[in-house]
Image: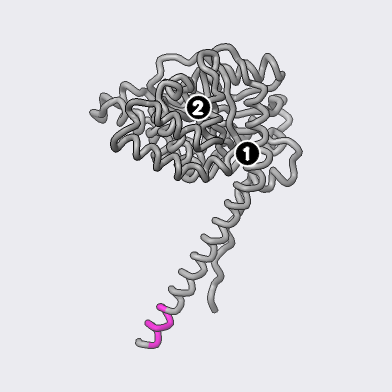
Amino acid sequence: MTSTPKTLPLPPVVERLQTREKNPICIICVGMAGSGKTSLVNRIQESLEEDLGQSAYCVNLDPATLSVPYEASIDIRDTINYKEVMKQHKLGPNGAIMTSLNLFTTKFDQVMGILERRAYPDEQETTSTEQTPNPPMDYIIIDTPGQIEAFTWSASGSIMSESLASAFPTVLCFVVDTVRCASSPNTFMSNMLYACSMLYRTRLPLVVVFNKTDVVSHEFCLEWMRDYEAFQKVLDEVSDSSGFYGSLTRSLSMALDEFYSSFANACGVSAMTGNGMDEFWTTVRKAAEQDFALDYIDDLKSRIDEQQARNQALARSDIRRLQRDLEEN
């Protein structure tokens, strides 16, 4: 008699999307160093509390920052001493950040427990002696380290992103420095290439946020995304567009043209003045309610089915190997 492999369970977010009218949206803010991620998180918190009258639960994952302008409900610095990690393990700045994230990931199940108790108090078992639970929160905002590679291309970053997406509708917010893009189309292409790679790596809904629009309008970035010829024309006008780097940028722009054609979640904001926040919230809600609830969940179910099929094939192979061994003996 053979045993059938157990069916892989679906993550809790699938049932919650089906049974609940409202779920808190998790926003993971990532981007190049200096793009204004922390300032944007601060603006997001202020916009939620002052303009929309909703609650924001902010999580700081940057162990090396000296201070944050927003009120962090969970802060990695309360658990991990960045300088002590650098000293004990004899690491450089970036290595210490990655090690700090790895150490924090070992306790991330506790973080998820705190977030789920705060987000879904009705799912928790309470006794008569316990205090009245806090009202559910509306948004979870994740602020990541300035060194983007430390989070997006590390095992700890993948674990934390997948854990959050398994419990809440999650959106990846890629923050772009609009001023730097205006000074160099090559910088714009580098940002778009990174955004595209993160989209296909995490498979989460992606929102590209062009920050610092109080200095330079982001309309030229949207035009470059929509009009291939317009971007090529700008490259022709730039002096450093010749040579290998220029040819590479042109080739990449052609390759990303398909990415642009199927991508619509882009907006411009100013973390300093708050301009564009209405469009930001509209774009984030669309990504969470449509892209995550439909595309990401369908893709997740397909991956679970594929894993289940691999497990079954492996089990059948083990059974055949066992039968051959028994027949030989």
Mark 2 crowdedness (10 Å alpha carbons): few <14, some 14-19, many ≥20: many
Q: Quadrant of the N terminus?
A: bottom right
> Residue 270 colored magenta?
no
Is residue 41 among what the camera can see?
Answer: no
Residue 226: percent from the left, percent from the top? 56, 36
Q: Which sits earlier in the primary sequence, circle 1 or circle 2?
A: 1
Secondary structure of the residue carrying numbered label 2? strand
Amino acid found under the numbered disc labelled 2: Val
Is the residue 34 above or below the residue 204 in the image? above
Is residue 31 among what the camera can see?
Answer: yes
The residue indicated by pointer 2 is 175
**Quarter of image, res 301:** bottom right
Q: Residue at x 51, y 17 (%)?
A: 216
For residue 151, the mark is: none
Choose mark 1 or mark 2, whichever is in front.
2
Secondary structure of the residue carrying numbered label 1? loop
State the extent of the magenta-drawn residues as a range.
321-327
Q: 64 or 289, which is in the foreground?
A: 289
Number of numbered discs visible in the structure rendering: 2
The residue indicated by pointer 1 is 169
